[in-house]
Amino acid sequence: MEPADDQPASITPSRLSTIRRRKSADNKFGTCAPGGQCELHFEAAIFDLDGVITKTAAVHSMAWKRMFDDYLQIRAARHHEPFNEFAHAPDYLAYVDGRPRYDGVEAFLKSRGINLPLGTPEDLPGGETVCGLGNRKNALFNQIIEREGVSLFDSTIALIRELRQRRIKVGLATSSNNSAVILDKTGTTHFFATVVDGIEAAKLRLKGKPEPDIFATATANLGVPSARAIVVEDAASGVQAGARGGFALVIGVARENNARELRDHGADVVVRDLAETSLEQIDRLVQAKRASV
Ligand SMILES: [Mg+2]
């Protein structure tokens, strides 16, 4: 964990040390069994999928680029305009990363002054509607993972195993419509006591990230108040959702050298990989944040 990132800005080291010493007789959390582990100060952890658990963020980025570049080239030829490619930082990270698929299509097109009809989820992949373009991106994504497989971030899996051993409920909240396939392919389905993905969100008419609805639904499914759950996210829209939802702690995972952006959007703490932190450190940060509000 980077020194500048290891504590929320409003919590000083001296205050944190006071909190560590404080004993709360009427608090059922944080008690320690004689000679055993202490109970943690939160009851659930909600993880994002792409870029936090699986190394699929790059595959999404690649699929979005192929789909949008093909479409932008067609438009450029049609309108006799120069082709301006879909770029990673100014386009993917700003408009698409972490958002529901069709919201991402709409947000990027709007940034280029392009207005297309929404269409319907049944539109053929590549049809000139928001849904048609989103469906083509999904088809490209599935082709790539079918061909190349999906790999996991070992540090995230290690943390999830440890959380489960410590009886913390673990949930998944992702905008992805492909979560069942990805979890099945990686043998990780059994880790999650609840999964709220893009399909479930559409069924329940939940607002996508940056709104907190899917995280809040995951914690509700686990029977845990949001204030007793931590969120782990790698996208700006995702940490924003966590911040808006009043969670016990929002951990931003800066895979893209975007630590500042994640902090600016509401992450309480930012790491480049979860191997940089530990469950005990996370628990101390939960305590510190709770004491600071
Ligand atoms: Mg993500």
Image (cartoon, rainbow, N blue to C red):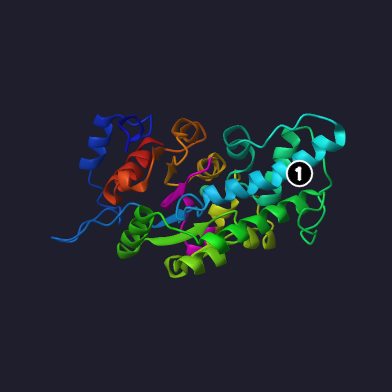
The residue nearer to you, when weighing 288 against 143, is 143
Residue at the spot 42% in from the left edge and 46% down from the top edge: 248
Q: Secondary structure at mark 1?
A: helix
The residue nearer to you, when weighing 270 against 33, is 270
Tell me: 141 left or right of 71: left
Q: Position of residue 96 (x, y in %)?
A: 63, 43
Residue 98 seen in the figure: no
Q: Position of residue 100 (x, y in %)?
A: 65, 50
Quarter of the figure that contains the C terminus: top left
* Badge 1: residue crowd in 10 Å (few <14, some 14–19, many ≥20): some
Residue at the spot 73% in from the left edge and 43% down from the top edge: 106
Q: What is the residue that sits farthest to the left in this orientation?
A: 35
Instruction: Find residue 188 and report its image quarter.
Output: bottom left
Whether ligand 1 has any atom under 8 Å from the Cβ at mark 1 is answered as no
The residue nearer to you, when weighing 80 against 258, is 80
The residue carrying mark 1 is 71
Q: Position of residue 182 (x, y in %)?
A: 53, 63
Q: Identity of the amino acid at label 1?
A: Tyr
Q: How many numbered callouts? A: 1
Q: Position of residue 243 (x, y in %)?
A: 51, 41
Residue at the spot 57% in from the left edge and 34% down from the top edge: 89
Magenta extent: 218-235
Quarter of the figure that contains the N terminus: top left
Residue at the spot 30% in from the left edge and 64% down from the top edge: 165
The residue nearer to you, when weighing 150 against 14, is 150
Residue 256 seen in the figure: yes
Instruction: Find residue 289 and report its image quarter.
Output: top left
Instruction: Find residue 53 and report its image quarter.
Output: bottom left
Q: Inspect the magenta stretch and tell me whether residue 21 lies in it.
A: no
| Residue 5 vertical placement versus 237 (above, below) | above
